[in-house]
Image (cartoon, helix red, strand yellow):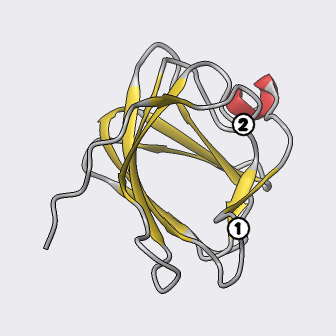
Amino acid sequence: MIIEPQRETVLNPEEQFPGGVWLDVLAAPHGPEQRATMAKVRFQPGARTAWHSHARGQYLHVTDGVARFGDRDGNIIEVHPGQTLYTPPGEQHWHAAAPGVFMEHLVLLEADDGADHASWWGEQITEDEYEGR
């Protein structure tokens, strides 16, 4: 058994996380036999992700604030502290802090076999998509 090293908080890149989104990796694979990553992600009010998907899906557990999650069909779900959202493999979606509130969630995802990255990234969401218009 080991205590995992504490990693530095990272400001995510604006191309994928506009508006101020910070990442703390809590657990990462130790070798090729492992695929899971767990992190704490904190969003400034109105901050969001670009469109993206995950090869093996993703769990997001909201710990503070109000989260918004959207899909390509225009559905927006608000998730509150204590609630967990699951996005299935390949589902294109975005997540964000609701207007006027900070938001924090824990994330758990797995990399795909042989892939360098656990996620596919697309274009920025529009203001209309964020507002559900």
- Which residue corresponds to the image point at 16% horizontal and 66% vertical from the top-left? 2
In this rendering, the answer to whether 12 lies above or below 4 is above
Identify the residue position indicated by label 1 in the image: 116
Residue 10 percent location from the top left of the image: 49, 31
**How many other residues sit within 10 Å of disc 1, few (<14), some (14-19) or many (≥20)?**
few
Q: Residue furthest right?
A: 123
- Furthest-top residue in view? 100
Check disc 2 and report the residue beneath it.
16
Determine crowd level at label 2: few under 14, some 14-19, many 20+ residues with C-alpha closer than 10 A: some
26 relative to 123 in the view: left or right? left
Secondary structure beneath label 2: loop
97 relative position to 24: left or right: right
Q: Is residue 9 above or below residue 117?
A: above
Q: Amino acid at mark 2?
A: Gln
Q: Is residue 15 above or below residue 95?
A: above
Residue 27 quadrant: bottom left
The residue sitting at 79% across, 54% down in the picture is: 72
Q: Which residue is depicted at the point 48% across and 19% down?
A: 44
Q: Position of residue 80 (x, y in %)?
A: 34, 41
Query: What amino acid is found at the position of numbered circle 1 in the picture?
Result: Asp
In-image side of 51 versus 29 (left or right): right
Q: Secondary structure at mark 1?
A: loop
Mark whose residue sits in front, 1 or 2: 1
Of the image marks 1 and 2, the number of the one nearer the N terminus:
2
Quick one: quadrant of the N terminus? bottom left
**Which residue does the image show at 81% across and 34% down from the upper left?**
124
Q: Nearer the viewer, residue 28 or 86?
A: 28
Q: Position of residue 99 (x, y in %)?
A: 53, 18
The quarter holding residue 105 reads top left
